[in-house]
Each structure stands twice: as C-alpha cells, then as structure tokens.
C-alpha cells in the first residue's frame, strides 16, 4: 500500500468516525429531549427545565460541529492548509472529553455535577479518542509525505 492509499484510508476512516460521533450526539440530544418532555409533563419548571434545554442545545451543536468537521476534512484533502481540520478535530474532541470528565467530577456551570454514565456517554468518548488518534496519525503521515517530497526535490536538484 502506497502513501496516498494510506492517506485516503485515514481520511475516510476519520470522516466515518466524525459522522458516527455526530449521530451519537444527536441520539444523546434525543434522550435529553425525552427527559425534558417528561419533566414538563409532570409540571417541573425552573432549573431542571433550563438545564435540559441547555444540554439539548449543547448536544445538537456538538453534532453539527462533528458533521462540519467531516465536511472540512474531506474538502481540505488537497489544500495547502490540510492539517488545520485535523488539529481542530483533536482540539474539539479533547475539549469535549475534558468537559465530560469535569461534569462528572467537579461540575460545570448550568449543569452542575452529573452522576449518570450511560452507554452513549461511553460510546462518544471512545469515538472521540478514535478521532484524536486518527487525526494524529493523519498529521504524522502528512509530515512524512512532506519530508519525502522535500528529499525528492533535493535529489532532483543535485542530479541536474
């Protein structure tokens, strides 16, 4: 397998994981919406309702960001700044992992400390870890390709 095939596999694998992460966040948002409806049906108001509204919005935005990252990764494939979407994917996934850990330990504004850890929570963290790993591999692969291209250019110059 040559370098271009490896890069293509990495790009499409990362894109699939980014889409899967977006879908997972939409499922989490749907679960929070169900909880919101249940709370509203029993007449709950105030902080609980506001917390659920914030969580629903946050998870929908997270899903949209992951779908956007997928598009960006695919479109930047031949761009000069093609590392940027991978760096953004790493940063966003790391931020969401840290925010999740904080929400389960020290608490975060609006939501406080959450004690429930669900299957979708674990799935999203695994997917985010994969996003970070694949993005790092993509960046390393790009650096290797750049150094090979630089070596080829210098050998062409010395042969002429």
Image: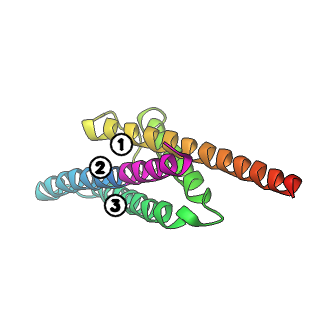
Residue 125 x/y as whole percent: 39, 39
Q: For the residues carrying marks 2 and 3, which lies nearer the camera in this image?
A: 2
Q: Earlier in the sequence, mark 3 or mark 1?
A: 3
Are the residues flagged by discs 1 and 2 in contact, CB closer than 8 Å?
yes
Which one is in front, 31 or 134?
Answer: 134
Q: Earlier in the sequence, mark 2 or mark 3?
A: 2
Asked if one can make out residue 98 in the rendered structure from this viewpoint, the answer is no
Please give the residue where the numbered disc 1 appears in the rendered image. 124
Which one is in front, 64 or 99?
Answer: 64
Asked if one can make out residue 77 in the rendered structure from this viewpoint, the answer is yes
Residue 68, image quadrant? bottom left
| CA neighbours of label 2 inside 10 A, class few (<14), some (14 to 19), many (20+) | many
Q: Earlier in the sequence, mark 1 or mark 2?
A: 2
Residue 138 x/y as whole percent: 55, 47
Please give the residue where the numbered disc 2 appears in the rendered image. 24
Which one is in front, 104 or 118?
Answer: 118
Is 29 a magenta residue?
Answer: no
Q: CA distance from mark 1 to mark 2?
A: 6 Å
Label 1, secondary structure: give it.
helix
Check the image and report above or below for 144 versus 68.
above
| CA neighbours of label 1 inside 10 A, class few (<14), some (14 to 19), many (20+) | many
Please give the residue where the numbered disc 3 appears in the rendered image. 60
Q: Quadrant of the C terminus?
A: bottom right
Are the residues flagged by discs 3 and 1 in contact, CB closer than 8 Å?
no
Q: Which mark identifies residue 28?
A: none
Label 2, secondary structure: give it.
helix
Label 3, secondary structure: give it.
helix
Which segment did they paint magenta?
1-18
Q: CA distance from mark 2 to mark 3?
A: 10 Å
């Amino acid at each position: 397998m040559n370098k271009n095939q490896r890069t293509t596999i990495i790009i499409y694998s990362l894109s699939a994981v980014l889409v899967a992460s977006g879908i997972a966040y939409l499922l989490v948002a749907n679960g929070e919406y169900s909880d919101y409806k249940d709370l509203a049906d029993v007449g709950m108001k105030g902080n609980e309702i506001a917390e659920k509204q914030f969580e629903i919005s946050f998870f929908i935005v997270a899903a949209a960001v992951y779908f956007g990252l997928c598009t960006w990764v695919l479109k930047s494939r031949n761009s000069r700044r093609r590392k940027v979407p991978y760096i953004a994917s790493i940063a966003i996934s790391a931020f969401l992992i840290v925010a999740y850990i904080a929400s389960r330990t020290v608490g975060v504004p609006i939501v406080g400390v959450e004690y429930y850890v669900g299957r979708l929570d674990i799935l999203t963290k695994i997917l985010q870890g994969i996003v970070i790993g694949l993005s790092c591999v993509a960046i390393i692969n790009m650096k290797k390709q750049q150094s090979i291209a630089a070596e080829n250019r210098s050998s062409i110059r010395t042969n002429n």
